[in-house]
Every structure is written in structure tokens, then in C-alpha cells.
């Protein structure tokens, strides 16, 4: 239902437990928005995709952008991404995606989308850097005294709370 309420052709989808850890590269984001695609990952960088995917375009800011091969398992990952509204509506519609874990939904959406040979892009550079506020049911952020703290692994392997430098 929510997707039907969006008027724009493209929108950014991020899960409610993500938070930004750096400033968004808006110049690169604007370059990507000039391309025609179905979904573009905002967090992923290549991670080997440059070896299995085809070069798609270079951005005006000089970064390479690749098109995932249709055989990649997660064409429709729920990671932070820019989605073409009509594409998401087609493959995440209530009548198309079965209940299950996020992974089940991602795989099912990807399987359905393959028939239409979607244009799913992965840039060589991350557009948005974000973290999960929850991981394995454990909260990774907290707010105290008008400051945000992030749970990080310390040098001895134990988790420690680190001041993010963000005032709230």
C-alpha cells in the first residue's frame, strides 16, 4: 500500500533500524538518478561484482557503475536502495511476495523479477554509508545525555560503547 502512495518515479527505501554514519554523496546520487534502472544499491560497493557483472556507465563524478547479472541471487535485496516505484510495486505487491524472513522475501522477489531482466545497478563506490541499529536482536545504538553512542567491537574483542560525535 505504501508504495502506491509515492508519487515520484524513484524513491530510497531504508529499513527503520538503519542510521547514516557519513554524509551522503549527493553529487554521486544525482549522477545515478540520471540513469534508467529498476534498483540501485546505495550501500554495496563492488565486493567482486565487477568480475561477474557488466560495466553499465560512468558517473559524471568519475565512478564506474555495473549492472548485476540476472543470475545474481539478490537482485531485489532489501538493503538501502533506490527503487523504481513501478518495479517495486510489481515484485513486492501483497499478491506476489510470500511471508517469511527478509532473506526469503529477497530471494522470492529476485526469482520473480528475473523474467523481466531487471536493471539492477551496483556502483564501485558506496553512495550512502549506514549501519544497523539492531543486529541479532541486540541494540547497536543508544542515546544518553543528548549524545548518540554506537556499540563497537573493542581491541580485546569485547563490545564497547563509543561516542558517535552526534548531538541529539
Image: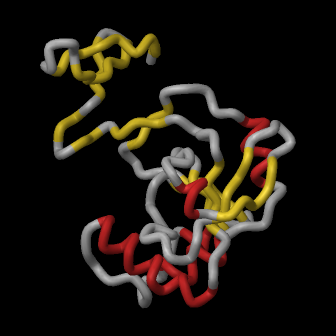
Q: In which quarter of the image is the C terminus?
A: top left
Say if 80 sits above or below 143 in the image: below
At horizontal 35% and vertical 11% (from top left) the residue drawn is 163
- Of 88 and 57, nearer the camera is 57
Which image quadrant for residue 26?
top right
Say if 107 sits above or below 124 in the image: below
Q: How many labels does the image show?
A: 0
The percent position of residue 105, horizontal first and vertical second, equals 36, 73
Instruction: Please indicate whether residue 75 sits to the left or right of residue 98 in the image.
Output: right
At horizontal 31% and vertical 9% (from top left) the residue drawn is 145
- Of 18 and 120, nearer the camera is 120
Q: Which residue extends farthest right?
A: 60
At horizontal 81% and vertical 46% (from top left) the residue drawn is 59
Instruction: Please indicate whether residue 8 sits to the left or right of residue 22 in the image.
Output: right
The percent position of residue 109, horizontal first and vertical second, equals 45, 78
Which image quadrant for residue 116?
bottom right
At horizontal 54% and vertical 56% (from top left) the residue drawn is 49
- Of 124 and 84, nearer the camera is 124
Say if 154 sits above or below 131 in the image: above
The percent position of residue 80, horizontal first and vertical second, equals 51, 51
Amino acid at each position: 500500500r505504501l508504495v502506491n502512495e509515492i508519487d515520484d518515479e524513484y524513491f530510497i527505501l531504508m529499513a527503520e533500524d538503519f542510521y547514516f554514519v557519513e554524509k551522503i554523496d549527493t553529487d554521486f546520487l544525482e549522477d545515478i538518478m540520471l540513469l534508467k534502472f529498476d534498483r540501485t544499491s546505495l550501500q554495496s560497493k563492488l565486493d567482486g561484482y565487477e568480475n561477474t557483472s557488466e560495466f553499465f556507465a560512468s558517473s559524471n563524478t568519475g565512478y564506474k557503475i555495473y549492472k548485476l547479472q540476472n543470475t545474481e541471487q539478490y537482485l531485489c535485496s532489501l538493503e538501502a536502495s533506490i527503487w523504481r516505484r513501478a518495479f517495486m510495486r510489481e515484485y513486492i505487491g501483497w499478491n506476489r511476495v510470500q511471508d517469511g524472513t527478509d532473506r526469503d522475501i529477497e530471494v522470492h522477489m529476485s526469482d520473480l523479477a528475473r523474467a523481466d531482466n531487471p536493471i539492477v545497478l551496483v556502483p564501485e563506490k558506496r553512495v550512502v554509508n549506514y549501519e544497523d541499529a539492531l543486529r541479532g536482536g541486540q541494540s547497536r545504538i543508544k542515546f544518553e545525555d543528548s549524545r548518540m553512542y554506537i556499540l563497537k567491537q573493542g581491541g580485546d574483542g569485547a563490545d564497547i560503547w563509543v561516542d558517535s560525535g552526534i548531538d541529539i
